[in-house]
Amino acid sequence: MKASRLAAVGTVAATAVLALSAPAFAHVSVQPEGVAAKGSYAVVNFKVPNERDNASTTQVEVNLPADHPLASVMPQKLDGWTVKVTKSKLDKPVSAHGEKISEAVTKVTWTADGKGIEPGFFQKFPLSIGALPEDTDSLVFKAVQTYSDKDVVRWIEPQKEGAEEPEHPAPTLALSAATEGGHHGSAAAEDASHSEEAAEHTDEAASAADGSDTTARVLGVVGIVVGLAGVAYGVLAGRRRTNA
């Protein structure tokens, strides 16, 4: 009886732990490929896991932040999914490359052509976005996940400072400090290219020097061997003459 009770208690405890930990890995999240620096352009991935056992994710909708509209939003073609980009008029025009933009992408929707994200799997949905704002440390996106059984989960709750994580947190992209060289980062890239080129030349010169030094050593050894062979031959020849 005691063993069965302990087993039952253990099962309940394990179920409770799984239930509490499930939301932690089921969140829709966003991460940059590399660095998302203020004032720059970046490629970000929206990671969508499927935490259901009996339904697939068939549609993912990402709403871009209205308080920081992005002038450029481009999705990457994704096999098995149809993407729709929705543009809307901005309440307040933004400036980009010296031009006023009154319309921007406000929503991107991916719809599965087939099974979508099956149970136990996840999918990344990439977007190229920019220029990233310079007056905030993060961007909050709102995501809507639709399942094959028509159930809808809205990941739209912002994380409040000092508060516990909400049940359905909105994907949040942290922005790093602006880098030198502007949004293109061409100066840094050029410096890196020059450094690599200089390193290659240095390696080539060192390799050539090593090769020349090795050749000289080999020739020197060969010369010594030939010289010794000549001396030995002369000694032998002298002995033969003496004996004769």
Image: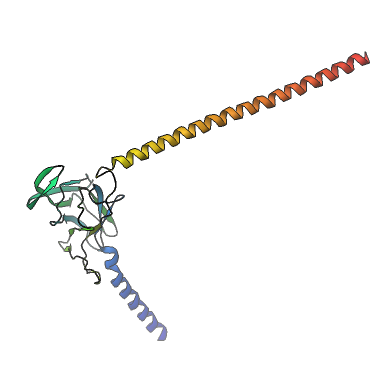
Q: Position of residue 26 (x, y in %)?
A: 26, 63
Q: Position of residue 61 (x, y in %)?
A: 16, 55
Q: Which of the pair 80/228 is nearer the observer?
A: 228
Q: Which of the pair 28/159 is nearer the observer?
A: 159
Q: Quadrant of residue 99?
A: top left
User: Where, quadrant-wise, is the N terminus in this rendering?
Assistant: bottom left
Judged from this view, the residue extending furthest toward the right is 243
Residue at (92% x, 15% y) in the render: 242
Q: Height in image: 55 above or below 19?
A: above
Q: Quadrant of residue 51?
A: bottom left
Q: Height in image: 121 above or below 195?
A: below
Residue at (13% x, 57% y) in the render: 67
User: Where, quadrant-wise, is the C terminus in this rendering?
Assistant: top right
Judged from this view, the residue extending furthest toward the bottom is 1
Task: Classify residue 201 as left or right of residue 134.
Answer: right
Q: Which of the pair 240/78 is nearer the observer?
A: 240
Residue at (33% x, 40% y) in the render: 189
Q: Position of residue 172 (x, y in %)?
A: 23, 59
Is any atom of residue 88 visible in this view? yes
Residue at (22% x, 65% y) in the render: 169
Q: Which of the pair 106/20 is nearer the observer?
A: 106
Q: Position of residue 175 (x, y in %)?
A: 26, 55
Is any atom of residue 147 visible in this view? no
